[in-house]
Image (cartoon, grey):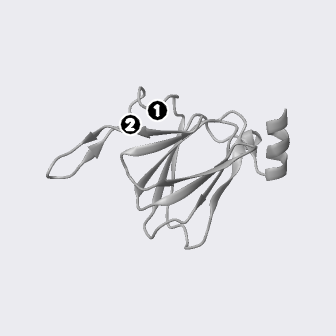
Amino acid sequence: MIERIKLPKIEDRRGNLSVLEKDIVPFEFKRVYYLYDVPSGASRGGHAHIEQNEFLIALSGSFDVVIHDGNNTQTYTLNKPDEGLLIPNGYWRELHDFSSGGICLVLASAVFIEADYIRDFEAFLQFKKQ
């Protein structure tokens, strides 16, 4: 199930600090990457994972995450560095409307394996019917 997860936020007049520890993200992450300098009007994602789980955080700026579960579509706006979006395997995701300076941090439960990706939406719908 898609879930927003609030991250600990330690507020300080010198600046805030948020922490990612293994008991906060509900899977062991094996890969961390980030998206940045996404041009206006461009989209990222456009795939689903068979096995991999992901946790997305807007480190800076904002962007929309459009999730499709095979039947319904839901849009989540990420714009807080102390909140993440858990996307379990089996969900189609697209990232849109990056603000200027928007940065998306992704924690993934697996290293990159191309065979884990479903990159065709019709193939995704067939996968969901199985």
Circle 1/circle 2 CB separation < 8 Å: yes
Q: Which corner quadrant holds the C terminus?
A: top right
- Where residue 49 appears, x then y in whole percent? 70, 40
Single out the residue that lies furthest toward the left.
Answer: 13
Residue at 38% of width from left, 52% of height from top? 80
| Residue 20 marker | 2
Position of 39 compared to 14: left or right? right
Q: Amino acid type of disc 1? A: Val
| Residue 34 marker | none
The answer to whether 67 is drawn above or below residue 99 in the figure is: above
Tell me if I can see residue 120 in this picture. Answer: no
Residue at 37% of width from left, 50% of height from top? 81
Single out the residue that lies furthest toward the top.
Answer: 23
- Where residue 5 appears, x then y in whole percent? 44, 38
> Crowding at label 1, few (<14), some or many (≥20) Cα neighbours within 10 Å?
some
Residue at 77% of width from left, 40% of height from top? 115
- State the residue position of label 1: 25
Q: CA distance from mark 1 to mark 2?
A: 7 Å
Residue at 24% of width from left, 48% of height from top? 16
Tell me if I can see residue 2 in this picture. Answer: yes
For the residue labelled by badge 1, is the local secondary structure a helix, a strand or a loop? loop
Q: Amino acid type of disc 2? A: Leu
Position of 61 compared to 48: left or right? left
